[in-house]
Each structure stands twice: as structure tokens, then as C-alpha cells.
């Protein structure tokens, strides 16, 4: 049988698949361990190693966490006990561990096998249980309305087709459930620095778009930045109640908020 798809659509799908392949390869080779200068001397995947990368992660996130529990200003930890939770993009497993300790029944997915290994080892090391699955969030192998809560931290903006992930989130979360998702802020300090330092001062605006300068200057194989209105519109296509908030976080590499 002949492929009846429009040629432009086939090309678009092919390009998107290549981006996803690039994403998988990039995050497998560059796991988000927050050891930018190679100063962690502990053996990888030991308790000491996890403690050190967690300390770096929490330092950057301290602007919206209380002194009692990490991320408690944006993660509803008190509401997660006994709930079925899906995490999209588990990385090195810190959020997965946090939600498991809060009593949640967690399923974590990630496109990178290295993230799956790291999260699985973290949980085993600490005697905790969760389902950790290598998967592309653009196509989730879960039933409709399977989860009470979906969490994703700094992940879906790296996808080739972010709207597909949002559609999948809406499909797998229960009607009375909720999702909380973090994406990069186009109006934030990091994006503004790229605009002036890379895009304008280096005259790259002559050969590339600002969007290309942004994703070439950030982590990951590809990345999108959103202004609040764009982010809300993306979710309003699938959710009735949508709200966004800009949260402060220190930049990962340079000491600017």
C-alpha cells in the first residue's frame, strides 16, 4: 500500500523523528548530573555521588523550596500519598525519590537509558520502589485516565513535538487529576543573555533565527522557550483549567537568577 500522507507531512515527521533520536543520544551522553566542572570525585551511582548531585540541584532550586521539604512550594507533596503519579523525564531520579517518599505510587519514564539506569540504581540503593521505564512521552503506553497526577520538570520543551506530549498527559491523567510542568522561560535572564551576547553581539542574527540561537546555547539537542501566554495556550488545547507562574531559579552555569 502507498503512503497516503502528504509529502510535506512525511518530511515533517522524518525531521521530528531525527530530533527525538538526537535528544535520546544527547541526554544519554550528557546526563544532567549538575557536575559542570567535574568536581564530584565520588564513584558514580553511589550514595555519596547522589548526595552531591542532589545538593547542587537543590541549591539552584532553593528560591521556591522551603527549608522543610524540597520543591514543596510547587510540588503538592502532602496530596500525593496513595496517588498514582507519572513523572515524565526522571533524569537522575531526585524527584522520583521525593514523590515515592511522600507515599506516591510512582511510574517514571525517560527517553534516555542512562536516566533509567541512574533512577533505578538510586531507588535500589535507598530501598525504594517505583516503576522506571524507558519511553518517549510523545507515545505513552498507558491506559486513558490512569494517573492522578503528572509531574515533569524541564523536559517537554526538549521534545520534537511538545504538543504531542501535552496531549498524552491529558489522555493519561484522570479528569479530576492535575499536571504540573516546568518549561524554559523565554522572558527569563538566561534567554535575555543569549539574545544580547550570542544573537546580537556576535552578529548571529544575520544567519540564524533567535529561536536557533536559544536552543544552540542551552542544554539538550533541541529546546524551546515559552512566554507564559504561549505555554498556557499550548495546554488550553487539552485542559480546561490552566495556570502558569514564573518561578525563580539560579542559572545552572552562571551565578545569575
Image (tube, helix red, strand yellow):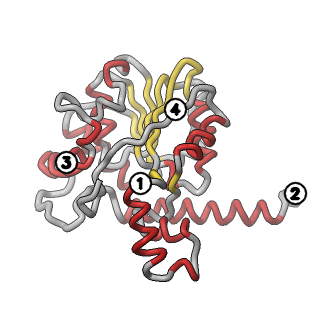
Residue occupied by mark 3? 50
Label 4, label 1: how far apart the Cα atoms are? 18 Å
Marks 1 and 2, how far apart in space?
43 Å
Whether residue 178 is situated above or below residue 119 in the rendered picture: above
The answer to whether marks 1 and 3 mark residues whose Cβ atoms lie closer than 8 Å is no
Q: Secondary structure at mark 2?
A: loop
Q: For mark 4, what is the residue?
A: 243
Residue name at image x 76 percent, y 62 percent: 10
Residue 3, given in percent of the width and then of the height, sits at 84, 59
Tell me the CA gap for discs 2 and 4: 39 Å
Q: Secondary structure at mark 3?
A: helix
The structure residue drawn at horizontal position 55% and vertical position 18%, both measured from the top left corner, is: 176
- Of mark 2 and mark 4, the one earlier in the sequence is 2
Q: Earlier in the sequence, mark 4 or mark 1?
A: 1
Q: Residue at x 36, y 55 (%)?
A: 114
Could you say which quadrant of the image residue 21 lies in?
bottom right
Query: Residue 20 location in percent, x, y?
Result: 55, 59
Q: Is residue 10 above or below residue 243?
A: below
Determine the image quadrant of residue 237: top right
Query: Which badge, 4 or 3, is on the more N-terminal residue?
Result: 3
* Residue 109 seen from this side: no
Q: Quadrant of the N terminus?
A: bottom right
Q: Earlier in the sequence, mark 1 or mark 2?
A: 2
Amino acid at each position: 500500500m502507498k503512503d497516503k500522507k502528504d509529502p510535506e507531512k512525511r518530511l515533517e515527521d522524518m525531521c521530528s523523528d531525527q530530533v527525538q533520536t538526537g535528544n535520546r543520544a544527547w541526554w544519554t551522553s550528557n546526563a544532567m548530573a549538575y557536575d559542570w566542572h567535574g568536581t564530584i570525585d565520588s564513584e558514580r551511582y553511589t550514595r555519596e555521588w547522589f548526595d552531591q548531585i542532589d545538593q547542587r540541584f537543590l541549591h539552584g532550586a532553593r528560591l521556591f523550596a522551603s527549608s522543610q521539604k524540597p520543591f514543596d512550594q510547587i510540588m503538592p507533596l502532602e496530596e500525593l500519598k496513595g496517588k498514582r503519579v507519572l513523572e515524565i523525564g526522571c533524569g537522575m531520579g531526585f524527584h522520583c525519590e521525593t514523590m515515592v517518599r511522600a507515599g506516591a505510587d510512582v511510574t517514571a519514564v525517560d527517553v534516555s537509558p542512562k536516566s533509567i539506569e541512574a533512577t533505578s540504581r538510586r531507588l535500589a540503593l535507598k530501598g525504594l520502589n517505583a516503576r522506571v521505564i524507558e519511553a518517549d512521552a510523545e507515545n505513552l503506553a498507558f491506559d486513558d485516565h490512569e494517573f492522578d497526577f503528572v509531574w515533569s520538570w524541564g523536559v517537554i520543551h526538549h521534545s520534537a513535538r511538545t504538543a504531542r506530549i501535552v496531549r498524552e498527559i491529558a489522555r493519561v491523567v484522570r479528569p479530576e487529576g492535575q499536571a504540573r510542568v516546568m518549561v524554559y522561560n523565554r522572558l527569563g535572564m538566561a534567554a535575555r543573555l543569549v539574545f544580547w551576547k550570542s544573537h546580537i553581539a556576535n552578529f548571529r542574527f544575520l544567519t540564524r533565527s533567535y529561536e536557533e540561537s536559544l536552543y544552540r546555547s542551552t542544554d539538550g539537542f533541541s529546546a524551546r522557550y515559552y512566554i507564559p501566554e504561549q505555554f498556557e495556550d499550548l495546554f488550553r488545547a487539552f485542559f480546561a483549567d490552566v495556570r502558569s507562574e514564573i518561578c525563580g531559579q539560579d542559572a545552572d552555569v552562571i551565578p545569575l537568577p
